Image (tube, rainbow, N blue to C red):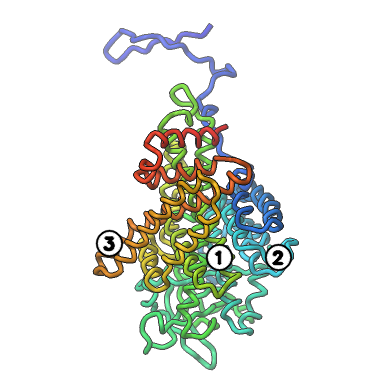
Amino acid sequence: MAKTAPASPRSGSSKTTGKVALPDLTATGYRFGADRVPDPMRDVNYFRLDPSMRLRLRLYLEAKEAAWAEMLLDEFGALCGGRMAELAQTANKNGPVLQQYDASGRRIDAIVFHPSYTEMCRLAYGFGLSQMNHLTDFRGLGRAPSRLVQAMAGTLFATAEQGLYCPVFMTNCLIGALRQHADETVKAKFLPKLLNLDPDHYYQGAILMTEKFGGSDVGATETKAVQVDGHWRLYGDKWFCSNANADLYSTLARYDDQIAGTKGLGMFVVPKILDDGSRNAVRMNRIKDKLGTRSMASGEMTFDGALAYPVGPLEQGFKILCGMLNTSRLGTATMATGAMRRGLLEALNFARERETFGKTLHRHGMVKRAIADIYAEVEGAGALLAYAYSRLDRSNQQPDSETLAGELRMITTLAKFNNSAKGVEVAAECVQVLGGVGYIEDRETARIYRDALVHPIWEGTTNMLALDVLRAIQKENADAALVSGMEAMEAILSRNETRSLFTPLRAEMEATLATLRESLGAEQVSREYYAYERVWDLAASVIGLVLVHEAEARLVGDGDPGGLDTAKAYLWKRKPAFMTRLYGEEDRFATAKEIVAKLFS
């Protein structure tokens, strides 16, 4: 028999309002509700939780490399979903600290990291995440793997950890720039260290662009490069230096005061430690107190006569930077895709077990809408990223193709534009799926949201990227190149289900491109004002087309119609008026219902 709790009379009254059974605190069934809150995800394999990744390997790679990549990514997916995710949680709660002076008062500017971050570095660089596509033989493949494989490994890593992936892809960009542009002396000096897979003796790189005065206006860079006794010395401040603890910094500096803007900027690399073991003349002024990516050190630095080495002809400095920037934009898009994927996984994990109002969370209509929309955006981002890297691989194989170069330029910009901005939207929606639980720092959704906010800022804001689409159309005819790529994609479609969606959607894309090109003749402020929404419409059409392309592969390969449901779910979210004309409004709920049923089967 349960005991009856004695009623407590209210102040000024002898009456009671009722009787409540006192719970038996010793009973095993007594609970405070914690067992009704789903546990966070722990010790999973991120690769196995993303079947679309396997499809994209087989769609864009030859069979031998695809099979090899599946084994590689399966191994790495287990590491990222297990040990790496655990380390990331600790590292982000114990950020880096700047120690400017030692016990004797000497200036040392040492950045001290928590051991969890150091261990993540060992695992990432030791695995070859930065280096793999620059090695002549990686893990028995017999050559360097495709950039697509590296991107998928990066997505898995970014699903676990956001902050460190920034140093990883900046290091990769720096390796590529040195290989392509540096003279043999500079290559010999730094490339072996940057390519080293020894987890205890690797080099990290950084790209330092931002200054207090210039911001996104790189042409306003004030850092100066001066020749002293036959050596280049740099003088100036850098204001937002991600991976401030890097071993080798790359930066632009003005080598001729008489040449204004970007034309007077040369590309240089600056080692942190000189050949004699002493520190270079680089002062660390402070570590940024950031909203997100807290595990990684971003700082404010001063070059005070730092020894530097030019990379390529000085007058080509900005062009070299642009090449690095395009690669790093794909890195940021990769990072954002990983954040979106982690948010989705955490939302699915929670919605699968949480019960509210008498039924499991995912069975509610509103939650079905949220889950279907989140899933559609994540799949769209992954599809666009994979296609972008497939274009990069193809462009590397055919470097003289102007059409491929133009399409790559456009797709790269759209991937950074879409994935970075939509990453914030998805992260916010995933927090809402978990409700108050998702807002607490004990859960990863809170960190994912904070980290996601940096993606639209790094390597060009969303506004800057919309303007870059206009420049790509005006200067490189990238619109025609994009149309050519989509026409080639349509030519291989064999199923009526996919062609009937692809063809009108391609017409939508071409109409948007025509509007963007026509706007080039308008007054500057006007065309800039309207470009933002038009580029969003362009991105949605392109992603939809790529998803339909994937749907065809699934239909032909194993008769699976799930890819078409994914493409339709994406287009219902991003282009509802277009979809209503094709399918009718009732198809929207039917598609979402099918998506959610498969996710929770």
Q: Amino acid under label 1?
A: Leu
Disc 2 crowd, CA 10 A, few/some/many (<14, 14-19, 20+): some
Answer with the quarter of the image where residue 27 lies: top right
Q: Earlier in the sequence, mark 1 or mark 3?
A: 1
Image vertical order of residue 14 relative to residue 108, above or below: above
Residue at x 59% of width, y 55% of height:
152
2 vs 3, front mark:
3
Rendered image: mark on residue 529: 3
Q: Is residue 601 above or below residue 296?
A: above
Residue beneath the point at 67% across and 74% down: 192
Identify the residue under disc 2.
198
Label 1 to label 2: alpha-carbon separation: 28 Å
User: How many angstroms separate mark 2 from mark 3 (CA)?
Assistant: 50 Å
Q: Amino acid at mark 2?
A: Asp
Q: Nearer the viewer, residue 534 or 500?
A: 500
Q: Is residue 280 left or right of residue 136?
A: left
| Percent position of residue 527, x then y | 28, 65
Q: Residues within 10 Å of mark 3 (few under 14, many from 20)?
A: few
Circles 2 and 3 in contact, beta carbons < 8 Å: no
Q: Which residue is mark 1?
A: 392
